[in-house]
Amino acid sequence: MAGLEVRDVTVRYGGATAVDGVSLAVAPGEVVALLGPSGCGKSSLLRAVAGLEPLAGGRVAYDGADLAGVPVHRRRFGLMFQDGQLFPHRDVGRNVAYGLETQPLGRAARDARVAELLDLVGLAGYERRPVPTLSGGEQQRVALARALAPRPRLLLLDEPLSALDRQLRERLANEVRSVLVGTGTTAVFVTHDHAEAAVVADRVAVMDAGRLLQVAAPDELRTAPASDRVAEFLGLRG
């Protein structure tokens, strides 16, 4: 299948198994959320897909090509984390342009791409703003624009909204969904918040104790949870 294919992936830290034989496919242009409580293995799975964690077993492939031995910087995946990891010494425009600097683009083309993305995330005209002057929500919008700038074939987002307050998270979840769909970006979005997952994702993959319990559209999860554990985590049962 084209897109991302995770097959029987296992990740271990010492003697502890963080991801236990997980298989998951993400189609081109699809947004899938990895949902589960803290310590369930969702971030470890994301890091394994990115190439940041070695596999103890299984396979990660993209468009049919096995990624074993392919380093992080050659996978052409974008990464976005909880704190955004922006460069405080660079202004907004230069942060967004960071991933474009190794591409064969002229200055005009690079500036046009930066302006396009800042407009897309609602920060048109922010190119010269110093990063430390931005609010938390604005910084995460810049981080999203930077991750999208090189046109990654897959975007991996690890709890990108969890440091924000509830009201801002709800608003940004809708904005992230709009940007991902508008750009046709294939994405895996890690979260512990089921409401956030339902807003952002086409399908939600529920994890617990390193295993995948159910993968379904948000509406199907609510109406037909596959187990008591899934229902309990979604708040459908006491």
Image (spheres, rainbow, N blue to C red):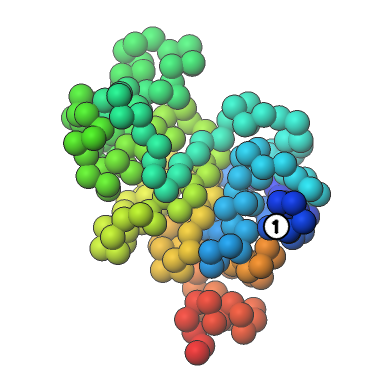
Give the vertical position of 228 relative to 169 (above or below). Answer: below
Give the vertical position of 15 relative to 90 (above or below). Answer: below
Q: Residue furthest front?
A: 14
Give the crowd class for mark 1: few <14, some 14-19, many >=20 residues within 10 Å: many
Res 32 quadrant in image: bottom right
Task: Report if residue 179 is visible in the image.
Answer: yes
- Seen at 40% across and 37% down, the residue is 85
In this picture, residue 228 sits left or right of residue 65: left
Camera-nearest residue between 125 and 166:
166
Camera-nearest residue between 43 and 145:
43
Task: Report if residue 217 is visible in the image.
Answer: no
Q: Position of residue 31 (x, y in %)?
A: 51, 52
- Seen at 30% across and 23% down, the residue is 90
Give the vertical position of 106 relative to 150 (above or below). Answer: above
Res 69 quadrant in image: top right
Q: Position of residue 179 (x, y in %)?
A: 37, 45
Q: Amino acid at mark 1?
A: Val
Q: Residue furthest right?
A: 57
Q: Position of residue 196 (x, y in %)?
A: 41, 63
- Seen at 43% across and 21% down, the residue is 100
Residue under label 1: 19
Per the image, label 1 sits on a secondary structure element best described as strand
- Seen at 43% across and 58% down, the residue is 200
Q: Report the label total.
A: 1
Res 17 quadrant in image: bottom right
Q: Position of residue 73 (x, y in %)?
A: 59, 27
